[in-house]
Image (cartoon, grey):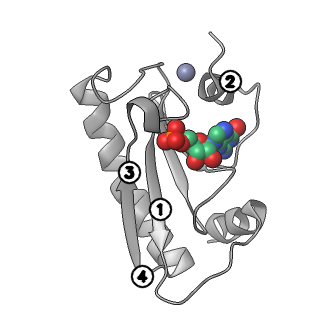
Amino acid sequence: MNCIFCKIINGEIPCYKLYEDDTILAFLDINPDSNGHTLLIPKKHYTDIMDIDNETLMHIFDVAREIKTKLENKLHCDGITFIQNNGDVQEVKHYHLHIKPYYNKNSHLQPVEDVFEKLAKN
Ligand code: 5GP
Ligand code: ZN
């Protein structure tokens, strides 16, 4: 299957990894809408919200809470939006949850590697 997110999971394509366990992976979006824009994906290839099982979905949202806190603490964003696209608005047909920080003041987009460094710092 020619799925870009399966390739990221297999290590064929690199990513800025924020979290990983046996079933899910979180990494920075390569073309972010805002600084810290993160994607959370299951390691098993599910297409969309109708395909994924409830247990994996709940786990994704548990970890999404932790990532939300990390983005708030490290990037000092003012809000967080969760988005999950399906059908024609979904570009990559491997289930993914977008976690998008929002900033009150206009914050210009920084290189993804710079944002990753901030998130990686203790
Ligand atoms: P969708 O429209 O499917 O919900 O969004 C797909 C997202 O995946 C987009 O925000 C896009 O920037 C991101 N994306 C696509 N290809 C890659 C990639 O190779 N690496 C990373 N980190 N993100 C990607
Ligand atoms: Zn896939």
Looking at marks 1 and 4 on the same chain, the residue that comes earlier in the sequence is marked by 4
Which residue type does callout 1 highlight?
Answer: Lys
Identified at 61% across, 83% down, the residue is 107
Label 2 beta carbon within 8 A of ligand 1: yes
Circles 1 and 4, Cβ within 8 Å, touching? The answer is no
At label 3, counting other C-alpha atoms closer than 10 Å, the crowd grade (few under 14, some 14-19, many 20 or more) is few
Residue at which label 4 appears = 78
Please state, as top left, top right, bottom left or bottom right, where the C terminus lies in the image. bottom right
Percent from the top left, x then y, of residue 20?
A: 53, 40
SS under mark 3 = strand
Q: Quadrant of residue 95?
A: top left
Circles 2 and 4, Cβ within 8 Å, touching? The answer is no
Q: From this viewpoint, which residue is outermost toward the bottom?
A: 105
At label 2, counting other C-alpha atoms closer than 10 Å, the crowd grade (few under 14, some 14-19, many 20 or more) is few
Pair 1/2: label in front: 1
Residue at which label 2 appears = 7
Looking at marks 2 and 4 on the same chain, the residue that comes earlier in the sequence is marked by 2
